[in-house]
Image (tube, helix red, strand yellow):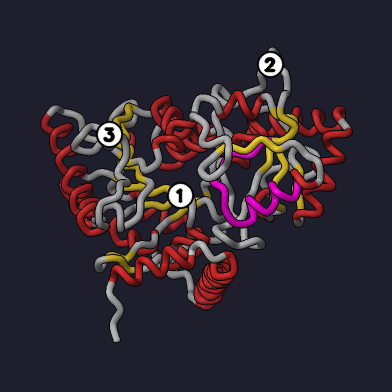
Amino acid sequence: MKLDSGIISWLQGFLKKVPAAVFVNNKLKARQVLAEYQQTCGYYSRLAMSKSHDELLATMRAGKHIAASDPVRVFFVGTDEYQDKSGLLQSVCRHADTRWFTNAAGDYGHNDSREPSVRAAANAARLWELLDDFAHAGWVPDVVLTQTWPNLIDPMVFRNARERWGLTVINISMDDRHQYWGGRVDGYGTGTRALIPYIDLVLTAAPECVEWYEKEGCPALFFPEASDPDIFCPMPELPKIHDISFVGARYGIREKLVKALRKAGVRVSTYGSGWEEGRIGVAEVPRLFAQSKIILGVGTIGYCDDFYALKLRDFDGPMSGSMYLTNDNKDLHDLFAVGQEIDTYRDIDDCISKVKYYLAHDEKREEIARAGRIRALSEHTWDHRFSNLFSLLGGS
């Protein structure tokens, strides 16, 4: 018997209100995400590399020189205005003559609530319209820089644009550990892997995923998130009024961690969807971080409690000049001196213990905060990332 869609919708809504059902569902989701990742690692460990990293980059650059104009021209296709304008887009604008995607209403970005197939087709048509209009006005980008997935835009438009204008298409992939394969929605593959035939280069925030793309014949670079020191910076004129702060949506391990900290007597300031304080404006986050003794990071993926990915907070936190404490993600050990420039926790009890220690030891906490700021300034700005990228590709 096939259930009516209305009944299914009601049943799903009902189950979301049953704590036991929510717990089981979240655990199943977490297990599925981790299992898919492990299977993918196994798959690519057995797959041979047909060309080396240098050979793939050389092939990509053959016949293309992104510095066809000076400065290089970049058309940016963004997704999350809040995230993109917290430093990334500003840096692209400093390094290139930059324009960006707006929808037909003039709004930023290409993510909206339309049905995936409708949205993907409409965004592709809009991108072509914008590029064609710019070309007729004498402005042709050297690079189309995107942060996208195939359910947001029909990737065939990238292939057509490459053929029409000879431009280079680069995608920034920050969520490859759990969104590489994706699923299928209205016939579209939703993972970043489905973009491979249509783009020239991938910038991935997961180091092992460089090999995944390159074994598929697509050049890739490890491109972790970064921060903007002009936005996230110490504000010594302001008092540190927050013992510990967290910015992000309320769900899963995040809620459990905050509850445990508060139960242990720690004053935690929380902002984001689902928290009592609500969301905080993009311009207010740097001030919050600067006025926090400790910035709390949670690096878990989805509802997993032992599977991590790099986050923007991992760089905005230290850049703020406040001490940053987050999950013990192994990626961070290659980017910061853990225990000296940032610190990490293994589980909730370890987090509580370290928070109490650092709140009681101001000098040690501030020493780590200063060192974290220095490391972030020297290696982890968006300007570093894009300067290195354009230099590698032959740009400015």
In percent of the image, x 52 and y 51: which residue is there?
A: 205
Residue 40, percent from left and from top? 51, 72
Characterize the local packing of mark 3: few (<14), some (14-19) or many (20 or more) Cα atoms within 10 angstroms.
few
Q: Secondary structure at mark 2?
A: loop
Q: Find out whether the residues at labels 3 and 1 contact each other: C-beta distance under 8 Å.
A: no
Left or right of residue 286: residue 135: left
Q: Which residues are drawn in magenta?
A: 245-261
Taking 1 as reference, is 181 above or below it?
above
Considering only order in the chain, which callout, 1 or 3, is on the residue closer to the N terminus? 3
Q: Amino acid at mark 2?
A: Leu
Residue 155, percent from left and from top? 26, 56
Foreground residue among 29 and 394: 29
Taking 266 as reference, is 176 above or below it?
below
Characterize the local packing of mark 1: few (<14), some (14-19) or many (20 or more) Cα atoms within 10 angstroms.
many
Foreground residue among 153 and 263: 263
Q: Nearer the viewer, mark 3 or mark 1?
A: 3
Q: Which residue lies under the disc numbered 2?
A: 238
In percent of the image, x 67 and y 34: which residue is there?
A: 318
Q: CA distance from mark 2 to mark 3?
A: 35 Å
Q: Which residue lies under the disc numbered 1?
A: 203
Q: Amino acid at mark 1?
A: Leu
Query: Where, by quadrant of the figure, is residue 217 drawn?
Result: bottom left
In percent of the image, x 78 and y 49: which residue is there?
A: 351
State the quadrant of the N terminus: bottom left
Q: Is residue 35 magenta?
A: no
Q: Which residue lies under the disc numbered 3?
A: 107
Q: CA distance from mark 1 to mark 2?
A: 37 Å
Report if residue 37 is visible in the image: no
Q: Find out whether the residues at labels 2 and 3 contact each other: C-beta distance under 8 Å.
A: no
Considering only order in the chain, which callout, 3 or 2, is on the residue closer to the N terminus? 3
